[in-house]
Amino acid sequence: MCLLLETIRVENCIAEALEYHQRRVDRSRFALFGKQSPLVLSDLIDTEAIPGEGIYKCHIIYGKDIENISYMPYIPRVVNRMKVVDAKRIVYDHKYADRTAFEKLKSENPGFDELILIQDGLITDTTFTNIAIWDGTKWYTPERPLLNGTRRQKLIDEGRLFPCEIHYSELKSYSKISLINSMLDLGDCTVEMELIDFSD
């Protein structure tokens, strides 16, 4: 059975953006297992299990049913050097727990903190985040990501992020890139374009 992963930011004992995570869990379980009865995340997350204030990652592994729930302090990754890599046939339309394809790409490209993935010449995601790019006026995000993340969708709904088709050849015309996911808001992890390797 394929397992799925949901990573939820819990700050000062408050689970963030639960409605977006709930929608994704419901969609994935219905698409993959035909399940219609929801796993109610607000009932499953036990904030009392978190020892104190601060930012924590709540990891939920699930399939038809819950497999495991864990909590760990959030330690941000340091991302400076990035490389553009062809992701070829990687399919990640649901947030699968199996990340073997991404780990393989990273092992094939040592010396970089993170990879920017392209398919058919278009920018998609990194191996662990969605992407936002800055043109000096607005933040844009690839129209066709590998996975529509919860943070990405929330930022679009709030009018802070604008989807558009971004070709690999156009990326250099933007000034910087921000990595976004459930733990990273817009601007939390930003890399200037001169630190990106475009050799691929």
Image (cartoon, grey):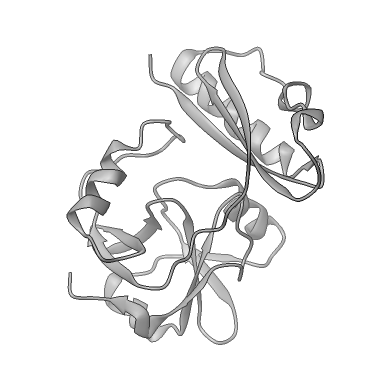
Residue 169 appears anywhere in the view: yes
Residue 7 vs residue 166, the one in the foreground: 7
Residue at 81 percent of width and 41 percent of height: 13
User: Would residue 173 be found to the left or right of residue 7 on screen?
Assistant: left
- Looking at the rendering, which quadrant does residue 58 occupy? top right
Q: In this view, does 163 lie above or below 15?
A: below
Q: In this view, does 62 lie above or below 23?
A: above
Counting the numbered discs, the total is 0
Residue 22 in the image, given as x and y percentages of width and height: 67, 31
Residue 103 in the image, given as x and y percentages of width and height: 29, 45
Q: Is residue 169 above or below residue 180?
A: below
Residue 121 appears anywhere in the view: no
Residue at 57 percent of width and 66 percent of height: 162
User: Would residue 131 be found to the left or right of residue 20 on screen?
Assistant: left
User: Would residue 141 be found to the left or right of residue 72 on screen?
Assistant: left
- Looking at the rendering, which quadrant does residue 113 occupy? bottom left
Residue at 22 percent of width and 44 percent of height: 89
Residue 147 in the image, given as x and y percentages of width and height: 45, 45
